[in-house]
Image (cartoon, rainbow, N blue to C red):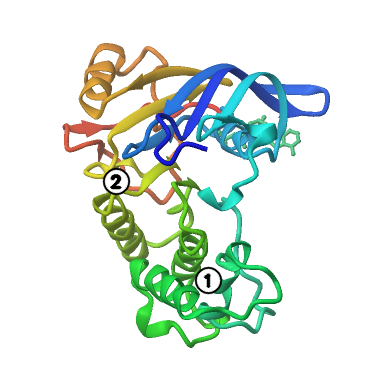
């Protein structure tokens, strides 16, 4: 395993889906160290199926998947890819503290019989601090808000010291205040050089963080470029062409949103 791989994720004509059904077809996508890639697209276009597919959580139906340069089937350093799933909330019944949950992310780094070392504890503390929850470290997670719990899950992934953090809609269903807090967390991680692949509808909140934008439509990638190229793409394919990539905001989202600080974008409503 190279110490500093040329690519963190490489999909070559990759297809993913479920038994008897292909959802994502023939996707080429490379995520390189230092990149923060936003994956956009309408609901149902296959974003989750894609990110879960590269992690081995949906059926790999064709093409190649390389993780840190190694075919996924032979890739065993699972903590090097951190994953924050989409619909994950910590059960109210879980009576564990923030520190205890985050420490789970550290477990793969040590044999089961070895007690946590001071380094393990430092990594866990740093992960909690990185998501801005240092002052809540000893509280039970059930006492935290949904957005704070999402940050606990990000910290749990960070405790594995991943080369890449894959997040599926980290801001979905989170109120504005916590969305800003989450965006701050991502901004800090990016500043520290953490590579990320983020499925999101909230490009606004992350506009100064993302280095690249990839759009899915009906199981295909139909855009892959820099934020500047994306603005150009929107200008060229803007309203009326069906090329909206950010058009399924929750009903609570304000109208006339701005994407990447580039003027109001008010996508036409589209039937589901
Ligand atoms: P997105 O993340 O872009 O909203 P998804 O990847 O969740 O899209 O879904 C893409 C398609 O895959 C949808 O048509 C959805 O119904 C289908 N799908 C998602 N999960 C499953 C599953 N477990 N079994 C079968 N089909 C699924």
Q: Which residue lies furthest to the right in this view?
A: 20
- What number is the disc on residue 54? none
Depicted 85 relative to depicted 176: above or below: above
Q: Under 8 Å from ligand 1: the CB of mark 1? A: no
Q: Which of marks 1 and 2 is in front?
A: 1
Q: Residue at x 69, y 40 (%)?
A: 57
Q: Is residue 93 left or right of residue 258?
A: right
Q: Under 8 Å from ligand 1: the CB of mark 2? A: no
Q: Which residue was labeled with disc 2? A: 206
Q: Residues within 10 Å of mark 1 (few under 14, many from 20)?
A: many
Q: Residue at x 42, y 83 (%)?
A: 136
- What number is the disc on residue 102? 1
SS class of the residue under badge 1?
A: helix
In the rendering, at what x and y percent does residue 270 appear? 48, 26
Tell me whether circle 1 and circle 2 mark residues in contact (CB < 8 Å).
no
- Could you tell me which quadrant the C terminus lies in? top right
The answer to whether one can see residue 168 in this image is no
Q: Nearer the viewer, residue 150 or 68?
A: 68
Q: In this view, does 261 lie to the left or right of 225?
A: left
In the rendering, at what x and y percent does residue 137 appear? 44, 82
The answer to whether one can see residue 253 in this image is yes
Q: Earlier in the sequence, mark 1 or mark 2?
A: 1
SS class of the residue under badge 2?
A: helix
Q: Which residue is drawn at 54% across and 27% down?
A: 271
Q: Distance between the residues labelled 1 and 2?
A: 24 Å
Image quadrant assignment for residue 200:
top left
In the rendering, at what x and y percent does residue 53 appear? 64, 34
Image quadrant assignment for residue 33:
top left
């Amino acid at each position: 395993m190279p110490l500093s791989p040329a690519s963190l994720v490489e999909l070559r004509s990759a297809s993913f889906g479920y038994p008897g059904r292909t959802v994502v077809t023939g996707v080429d996508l490379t995520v390189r160290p230092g990149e923060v890639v936003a994956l956009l697209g309408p609901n149902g276009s296959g974003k989750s199926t894609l990110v879960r597919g590269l992690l081995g959580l949906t059926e790999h139906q064709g093409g190649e998947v390389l993780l840190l340069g190694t075919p996924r089937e032979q890739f065993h350093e699972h903590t090097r890819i951190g994953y924050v799933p989409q619909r994950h909330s910590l059960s109210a019944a879980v009576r564990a503290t923030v520190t205890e949950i985050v420490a789970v992310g550290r477990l793969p780094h040590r044999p089961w019989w070895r007690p946590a070392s001071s380094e393990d504890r430092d990594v866990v503390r740093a992960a909690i601090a990185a998501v801005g929850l240092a002052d809540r470290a000893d509280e039970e997670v059930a006492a935290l808000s949904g957005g704070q719990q999402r940050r606990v899950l990000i910290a749990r992934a960070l405790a594995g010291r991943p080369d890449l953090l894959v997040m599926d809609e980290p801001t979905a269903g989170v109120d504005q205040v916590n969305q800003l807090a989450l965006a701050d967390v991502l901004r800090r991680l990016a500043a520290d050089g953490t590579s990320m692949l983020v499925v999101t509808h909230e490009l606004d909140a992350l506009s100064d963080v993302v280095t690249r934008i990839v759009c899915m439509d009906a199981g295909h990638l139909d855009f892959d470029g820099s934020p500047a190229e994306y603005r150009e793409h929107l200008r060229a394919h803007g309203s009326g062409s069906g090329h909206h990539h950010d058009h399924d905001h929750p009903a609570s989202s304000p109208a006339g949103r701005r994407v990447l600080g580039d003027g109001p974008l008010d996508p036409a409503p589209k039937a589901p």
